[in-house]
Image (cartoon, rainbow, N blue to C red):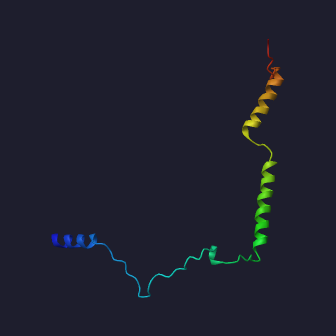
């Protein structure tokens, strides 16, 4: 029993060796200094439509967010408080004395 535990622990403790197929070294593209190995950049047919669509969409969203109505709770509460104080006759303006 003890021998099986020891043999199992030594088997688990040794490092596993990397086994590779017999296909040779790992192949990769040699660095050429060009992005995506393209010497001259050629636009594809869909790129102009993509740029116009994404840029136009971002511009439209920016305009929509700029002109979005203020619906915050603080603004609503401030307006309600001002209306309530006006009805009670309390002046909201600070008058400087002296």
Q: Residue 45: image x %, image y %? A: 77, 77
- Relative to 79, say whether 39 is above or below: below
Side (left or right) of 4 relative to 46? left
Residue 1 visible here:
no
Q: What is the quadrant of residue 21 in the picture?
A: bottom left
Q: Nearer the viewer, residue 96 or 42?
A: 42
Q: What is the quadrant of residue 83 in the picture?
A: top right
Q: Nearer the viewer, residue 84 or 9?
A: 9
Q: Residue at x 76, y 69 (%)?
A: 50
Side (left or right) of 61 relative to 9? right
Q: Residue 53: image x %, image y %? A: 78, 66
Q: Quadrant of the N terminus?
A: bottom left
Q: Residue 26: image x %, image y %? A: 47, 81
Residue 80 visible here:
yes
- Relative to 48, say whether 66 is above or below: above
Q: Residue at x 79, y 27 (%)?
A: 84
Q: What is the quadrant of residue 56 in the picture?
A: bottom right
Residue that protrudes farthest toward the top in the picture: 98
Q: Residue at x 78, y 53 (%)?
A: 62
Q: Residue at x 71, y 76 (%)?
A: 41
Q: Quadrant of the C terminus?
A: top right
């Amino acid at each position: 029993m003890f021998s099986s535990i020891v043999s199992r622990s030594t088997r688990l403790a040794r490092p596993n060796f990397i086994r590779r197929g017999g296909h040779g070294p790992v192949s990769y593209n040699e660095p050429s200094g060009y992005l995506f190995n393209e010497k001259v950049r050629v636009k594809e047919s869909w790129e102009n439509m993509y740029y116009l669509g994404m840029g136009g969409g971002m511009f439209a969203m920016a305009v929509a967010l700029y002109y979005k109505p203020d619906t915050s709770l603080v603004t609503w509460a401030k307006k309600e408080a001002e209306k309530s104080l006006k009805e009670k006759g309390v002046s909201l303006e600070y008058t400087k004395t002296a």
